[in-house]
Every structure is written in structure tokens, then in C-alpha cells.
Image (cartoon, coloured by chain):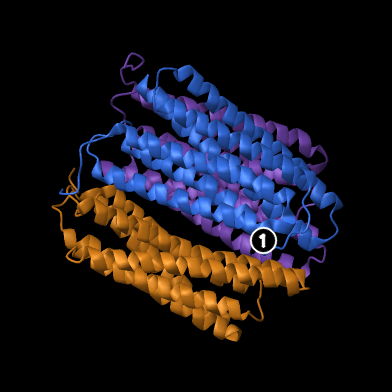
Chain colours: A purple, B orange, C blue
């Protein structure tokens, strides 16, 4: 009981925005990584640093949640959003790690396309998170959520075409296994963004 | 507050039944697909349509949940059931998509066996969902749940035998990777059915 | 209503400890399995038995939860802990099954290293679970959680080095696919232990 403090609503939104910004940064750094594979290690280290920062922010959010009596939005939704945004950056980091540990020497055009969709998704997540702190324009927020869903569909299409091509054309099975993993991880990044969008949509509906 | 309506309990069960029926239809269409691979694209499109309908029903359930003050069963359980049934059809759709994108030309007997278990599981889920709306015969409901668990075990055994055979006998590694993925997705379909069974069992216990 | 009983707090902690002990036993049996591959079937059956016992304990915990009005810790946390410990043993069992169904004839040094980290993680989870029943030394509990996090990091490093080596050196693609799966499952075991640690940390914070 001792450690509990009076609620300061704004701090939750500050922490959400911090995590969302780290996701955007990581997505950009991932694009840099695949365009500059000879320095992959150094880009990957940068992503690791961002992922650690996100872990810390997540931790601080959960700590704040445990010490706050009255929360600006449902406790369960705060938990959910925090976990889902942390997943976004975790999967970006996982994709970058795979490139390092598989010692990937070249990527396909489709990898770059998927990285671009990840950037767009992360940026729209950040936009939606900023909109969430003041619910004055719920219709804009819903638009952002629809856009995140559209981007997930786009990633899905790119991934499927890329996978079909891989199985048709790639004769080096090790390279096939490597790229298959990376495609799936990048597609999962956009799935995680969609999870955030669905949670935000729920919050908007709840408050309407 | 404005959008909230008085509770109409029946609507939740109608929506659950709708989703369960879509799962059953998708499982049957998947069997048709693997028995008629030359028209795989068209069967796969049918499954996609069913999956979209399930998404809409899920969305309507969540919306109803947010607008209902008093729910017939725990809010958390409604959320859970909805999500878990949506997962069933998502994995059926994922399996059908893999067949398309991997351009699978032939399937094994074990694939057909797994598809049959998926049909039986989905049908038992639908039966249990129908039983849930009136809790007059909880013992029948528990029997359905036990049956779904049994089917999950059966799928597990088929999958394991199929996988062992694949690694022993298949010399085309691309075909091995394709079938391995499809086996795992189909086994996951029965896992999702088991999740539904466990949630239903919890609801029955809670109300007893 | 009829089946409900007065709360007996201790029983939850007894059940948690039972599950945690089963996880520790399974981790040890897994190590025996990989050091004695010619008797893999029999070790794997032992793990299956332990996993079944854990399922029963999980079931009894959920049943107790549904019949208890006032719980010693948050209902949601009990649910979470139970599920997360069940996942630990499920993934150990999955790894042992893969060795059987892939008919693995030899494992790498890294597999043994990962098995050792799984044992250490499971034992620290058990230690933390024992500490949870009396919250007199929250600082010790936090130390256990930090140690579980450290072990997860260690598993991650071993897995990554092992995977890199596999793709560099293994020319038998079937063996590569088999070991890749087993590495990933073992690393997931330590992820599940980390989930338990995070839940325990949340409980400690909540009660402080």
C-alpha cells in the first residue's frame, strides 16, 4: 500500500508514446540493416539497444500500473497495449538477429518491401497512440486502425508472393530456410501492429 | 455511454453459433481442397470468404460486448471464446494458403486424416457451443469437451507419425518443408478447438 | 453455488509447487534422454507421464479457482502462473517428442548446454514459487526473477551460436531442420520460465 501514488493519467500516455517511438526507430534501423548488410552487426546492435529501452519502458508501465488506483483506461487494456507494442519491437529484433546468425549475404526485393510495410505500420501505430491520449477525434483514430489493418493485408500479400517465388526459384535450401524465417518474422511484425490496432479500437468503442 | 443498450443475452449465443458454423464449413471446404488440388485456388477463395465472415462476426461480438452492461457469461469468457473460435478458422485458412503459395501438387494420406480430425473437432465445437446457450445438460457439454480433447490427441498422433515418415522417406527437401508446415498448421487447428473446450469447461464449472 | 468452499489459501501454493516440481523433473529427464539416445523412447515416456501429471494439477488449480471466493493472490495471476508453468513442461515434452519423431541419432554440445540452462531455469522457478507462498523476503524473490531472466539470456546466446554453426557447417539438411526445431523449442522453455518470473515480479510489486 505504501508505494502507491495518486494517479497521474498523462504518464501512461507518455510511456506508450515512448514505446511506440522506439518501434518506429527500430523499423527504420532494420531497413538500414538490410540495405547495408556488410555493417549488419552494428545496425543489429542498435536495434538491440532500442529493444532494451522498450523493455525498460514496458517495465515502468507495469510498475506504474501496479501503483495507480485509478487508471485513465482499463487496466487490462493498458496491460494489453504494453505487451503488444513490446511484441512489435521484439519481432523486429528477432528478424535482425536471424540475419546475423544466419550470416545472410543478400536479401530479396520482397524483404525490402516487407521492411517498408513494417515502417509504415509502426508509424501508424505511433500516430494512433498519440491520438489515444485525447479522445477528441475517435473517427481519426478508427481511420488509423483501418490503415494498420490494410498494411497487415499488404504484408501478407507480399509475404505470400515472396514465399511462392522462393520455393519455385531458390535452389540453395539453406538460403530458402533462412529467407522463409525472415519473411515470417517480418509478417508477424505487422500482425503485432494489427493487435495494437484492435485493442485501440476496443478502447474507442468502450468510451463512446 | 450513449451507445449502450440493454442486454439481450441470446445475441451472444447466436453470434457464437454463427462463428462455430463458419469453422465447420471451412473445415469441410479444406477437405474438398486437398481432394481436388487442381481447383485449389477456388476452394481456397471460398475459405477466405468464410474467414472474412468469421472476422465480421468476431467484430460484432466484441462490439456487442462493449455495449452490454450485463452479460450472460463472464465478459472475459466471451472475449476468450470469440478469439479462440476465430483462431480455428484462421489456421484452416493459413493451411489452405500454404497449399496455394507452395504450389502443392500432391498430399499424403496423413494430410487427409488430419483434415478429417479437423472436421470432427470443429463439429464437436459447434455442438458444445449450442449446448452452452442452455446449461440444462452440463454433463453432455463436458462429454463434448472430453471428445474435443480426444480428437486433439488423435491429431497429435497422426501428425507425429506423418512427420517421422516424412523425415525417413521424403528425399525432396522442398516438399518436406512444405508438408511439415501443413501438418503443423492442421495440428494447431485441433489445438485451437481444445482451447475452446477448456474455456467451455471453465464456464460450466463456474456456473455449477 | 453448491460446490463452492471456503478459501484455503495454502492449497494454491501446494498446487503451484507440485507443478514447478514436475517441471524440474521433466528438465532432468530431458537431459538424461539426450545423453542416452538409444533409450530415448523410454525417457520420452517418462516425460509424457510428468506432463500428464502437470495437466491434472493445472486442472485441479483451475477447478479450485472456480470454487474459491477469496484467493490469496489475484485470480488473474493464479490463472497466468498456472498456464505459464504448464507451458514450461509442454515445451520440454515437445522437444523430447521431436527427438523421437525425427529419430535423432546424435545431438550437439549446444543441445546439452541448452538442456542444462533449462534445468537451472526450472529449478529457479521452483525456488521462486516456494518463496511466493510467504512474501516475507520479497528481495530474495526478485533475485530469483533476475536470475531466471539471466538464464533466458544465456539460452538465447547459446541458441544463436548453435544456429549460426548449424547453417555454416551442417551439410545434411534434414539434420539441420531437426536440430533447428529442437534448439528453438529448448530456447522457448527458458522463455516460458521468464514469463513465470515476470508474473511473480508483478505479484511482488502489487503486494508491496
Residue drawn at (76%, 53%), measured in percent from left and top?
A107
In the rendered image of this protein, does residue B61 appear above or below residue C191? below
Residue B61 or residue C137, whichever sits in front: C137
Q: Position of residue B47 (x, y in %)?
A: 47, 74
Badge 1 marks a residue whose secondary structure is helix
Q: Quadrant of residue B203?
A: bottom left
Residue A67 or residue B202, whichever sits in front: B202
Residue B138 or residue C146, whichever sits in front: B138
Residue C37 or residue B127, whichever sits in front: C37
Residue drawn at (42%, 61%), measured in percent from left and top?
B194
How packed mark 1 is, by other alpha carbons closer than 10 Å (few <14, some 14-19, many 20 or more), is some
Tally of marks: 1
Residue drawn at (37%, 25%), measured in percent from left and top?
C206
Q: Quadrant of residue A61?
A: top left
Q: Quadrant of the C terminus of chain C?
A: top left
Residue drawn at (40%, 17%), measured in percent from left and top?
C136
Q: Circle 1 marks a residue in which chain?
A: C
Q: Position of residue A137 (x, y in %)?
A: 33, 40
Residue at the top extreme of this rendering = A2
Q: Position of residue C26 (x, y in %)?
A: 57, 46
The answer to whether one can see residue A80 in this image is no
Q: Residue C171 vs residue C161: left or right?
A: right
Q: Name the residue carrying label 1.
A: C100
Q: Residue C59 vs residue A88: left or right?
A: left
The answer to whether one can see residue A160 in this image is yes
Q: Residue B114 vs residue B203: left or right?
A: right
In the rendered image of this protein, does residue B158 appear above or below residue A191? below
Q: Residue B164 vs residue B79: left or right?
A: right
Amino acid at each position: 500500500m505504501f508505494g502507491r501514488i495518486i494517479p497521474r493519467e498523462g504518464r501512461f500516455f507518455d510511456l506508450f508514446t515512448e514505446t511506440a517511438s522506439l518501434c518506429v526507430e527500430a523499423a527504420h534501423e532494420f531497413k538500414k540493416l538490410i540495405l547495408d548488410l556488410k555493417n549488419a552487426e552494428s545496425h543489429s546492435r542498435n536495434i538491440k539497444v532500442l529493444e532494451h529501452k522498450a523493455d525498460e519502458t514496458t517495465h515502468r508501465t507495469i510498475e506504474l500500473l501496479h501503483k495507480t488506483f485509478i487508471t485513465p483506461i482499463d487496466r487490462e487494456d493498458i496491460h494489453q497495449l504494453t505487451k503488444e507494442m513490446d511484441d512489435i519491437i521484439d519481432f523486429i529484433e528477432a528478424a535482425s538477429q536471424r540475419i546475423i546468425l544466419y550470416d545472410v549475404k543478400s536479401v530479396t526485393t520482397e524483404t525490402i518491401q516487407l521492411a517498408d510495410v513494417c515502417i509504415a505500420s509502426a508509424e501508424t501505430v505511433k500516430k494512433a497512440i498519440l491520438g489515444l491520449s485525447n479522445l477528441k477525434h475517435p473517427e481519426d483514430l478508427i481511420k488509423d486502425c483501418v490503415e494498420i489493418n490494410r498494411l497487415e493485408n499488404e504484408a501478407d500479400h507480399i509475404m505470400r508472393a515472396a514465399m511462392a517465388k522462393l520455393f519455385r526459384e531458390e535452389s540453395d535450401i539453406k538460403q530458402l530456410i533462412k529467407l522463409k524465417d525472415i519473411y515470417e518474422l517480418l509478417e508477424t511484425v505487422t500482425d503485432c501492429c494489427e493487435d495494437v490496432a484492435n485493442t485501440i479500437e476496443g478502447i474507442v468503442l468502450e468510451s463512446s
